[in-house]
Every structure is written in C-alpha cells, then in structure tokens.
Image (cartoon, grey):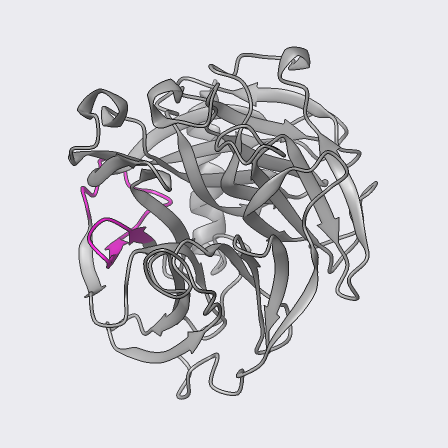
Amino acid sequence: MRSRAGTVLAVLTALALGGAAFAAPVGGAVADEPFVGPAHTVTTVASTVPANGDMNPYGVAVVPADHGKLHRGDVLVSNFNNSGNLQGTGTTLVEVSPGGTVTQFAVIDPAGLPGACPGGVGLTTALSILPGGWVVVGSLPTSDGTAATAKAGCLLVLDSGGTVRETFSGHGINGPWDMAAVSRGGVSELFVTNVLNGTVAANGAIVHRGTVLRLTLVGGTHGDPPRLVATKVVGSGFAERTDPNALVVGPTGVGLSRDGTLYVADTVNSRIAAIPDAPFRETSGGTGRTVSECGSLNGPLGLVVAPGGDILTVNGLDGNLVETTPGGDQVAVRALDTSPTTTLPGAGALFGLAVRPGQHAVWFVDDVTNQLDLLH
C-alpha cells in the first residue's frame, strides 16, 4: 500500500507532467512591458479598522470564489495590532468589496482555539484562501507588543464562515510571517516564511536562521478542514533580527512562478532571492540565487508574482512598489505612500499586496492610514 506522503508526491508529479502543476496566479512568458506600466493612480478603497479597533493591516488575499461569507473578488485583510496599537495582538480579519463595503469576517478568540498556537494570536501577513473557502492565516503573537514576548505562533485554518477549525503548530513553524499558496486536485502547498528562529535571544543582532517551509495539505473540499501531511524546509539561512518598530525583520513575501521557482523577499538585505524547484525539492535551497538587490529595493516586504512573470515587491523603508523581471532588471517603481514619518516618507507603511484579477492593478494595505488601497 502506498504511503500518504507517497500518494501526495504522486499526485503532484502527475499534475506537473500534465503541464499545470498548480493553479498559480501567474501567467506564461515574461511580458514585454512592466505589469504596472499603465498604473499610476492610487485610490483609497476603505478603512481596514473593524469594530474592536484593531489596526496595522498586514495580509491581503483576493477571494477566488463564493463560499459562505466569502464573495468572489472581495479582499480579505488581516490586522496585526490591537486597538492599543500593540504589535502581535491583532485578532481580526475584515472583508472589503471592490466598491469599499467592509464586513468583519472573523474575530479570533485566543482562548477558544481548537488546537495549539504557542503564545496566542497576532495575525501576520501570511494569509491565503484555499479551495473550499478555507482561510489560512499566520499568527506571530506577543503579550505586550514587544519582540521580547514574541512566541512561535501557528497557522490558523478558518472555514468560510470565519470559524477557526484547526491550527498547525510545530513542524518548523516559528513566527510565520508571510505565505504563498497554490492548489490543484485536492492538494495544496503552503510556502511560509519564519522569522523567530533565534531572533529574540539575539536581542537585535542579526542571525542567519530564517526559513521557508513547504507544507503539504490534502482534502478540504467536503466540509472537513484540509489535513497537514508533510513539511519540508525549502529555504534556510536568511538574515533576521528583532526591531522596535517592525517587531521582527526577516524573510517576508514569497511567490511561486509557473516554472516552480519560489521568489523570496530577503528584507534585511534588500534582495529578491530565487529558490528553484520549490514544489518538489527535498533539500533546502539555502538563501537561494540573488535575482536582484538594492537599487530601488529598500527593505522589500510583501511579494507577488504578476501575470507575465515579473516580481512585484513593496518596500518597508520608503513606501515604493518595485517591479523586477526574473532576469533581475528593476523595470518600474511606483510611490504608493509618501506619508511623513520619523525616518523616510512612506517608511513602515506597506506590507501585503495582491494583484487584482484581470486588471493591471494591485491591492495593497497602508499601515500609516489603516486602509486598503488600489494602484491602478
């Protein structure tokens, strides 16, 4: 009898041989013109602050299909801070329609979780929606908003009604910071960056222990939550450190290209890394190959792969979006936030982003204003 892990690998291999290993949100060949070439306008869509006052929006995910409270084309947003602006204490997810209507998708009670989540709940940029309407969101919790109390957290799995049905903890999950997800044929792969491996103990010094995990899930299409059946470290050795303003700085956004290359925003080094064969590799790709570094990249955080294959990142240190080709050329820069801060205009404003399907447009959250905005 074939093992469960062997069955999963066989399914994935069959899909790859069929020419479409995953339903990745990317196109085919690299476009001749930048994806954001025609996009020069930023429009505020709605406030992301729910009834309980949570703020500091982090994660962004576009709803792919109608399920329960989820409506196709709406945008889910996760909040990292509570109403007192303490980092790692946000417990809410809001749903925003393209027209700006805001509803509260979920308020997560740390005391009522169905499984382990070391430290509690502080929702991060790690946010994805799987087939069947299952929402997966990361938690990197603190008790007082400081890195000194940060704990390993978990991944929380919510049904389409906003109820937490299971948690994934351990298995290398240690401060899940951002995530990319791809699914096909009842199998989903989550690629999750982790930023708490040795960072708290280092007390602000840089350590090179950040990881990217691949989590394989099966099921989730008949009412029961998807099951975690395998984990693998596909990236390791990324620079990370605690920070009084950002809590933690380390590997953040991830995006999977159609050829299986996983792009990682190496925030500390202002770099985009590439890890080949990410869905199938059985060993760590380390910190990957450098695609591009510095230039207009300035502490890149959120990352997505655009239709056509270019890489979109948003800077944590200056409020800009940068478009980079797979060959490393930085082909477009857009100023998304120019709010004055104690450092540079736009610093600390940007985290999650997502391509608006069918348009040359990008949804993104602005932490300075606590809003969901659209570049179009």
55 lies above or below 139: below
Instruction: Give coordinates of residue 95: x percent, y percent.
Output: 73, 48
Q: Residue at x 42, y 33 (%)?
A: 176
| Number of numbered discs | 0
Q: Is residue 236 visible?
A: no
Give the quarter of the figure containing the C terminus.
Answer: bottom right
Instruction: Give coordinates of residue 83: x percent, y percent.
Output: 63, 34
* Residue 250 lies in the magenta stretch: no
Q: Name the image quarter holding residue 207.
A: top left
333 lies left or right of 164 = left
Image: magenta residue range:
264-287
Q: Name the image quarter holding residue 134.
A: top right
Instruction: Give coordinates of residue 322: x percent, y percent.
Output: 37, 71
Q: Is residue 205 visible?
A: yes
Q: Residue at x 49, y 41 (%)?
A: 126
Predominant SS of the magenta segment = loop
Instruction: Give coordinates of residue 231: x percent, y percent.
Output: 39, 27
Pick the front one: 73 or 293: 293
335 lies above or below 255: below
Q: Residue at x 79, y 66 (%)?
A: 99
Pick the front one: 203 or 221: 203
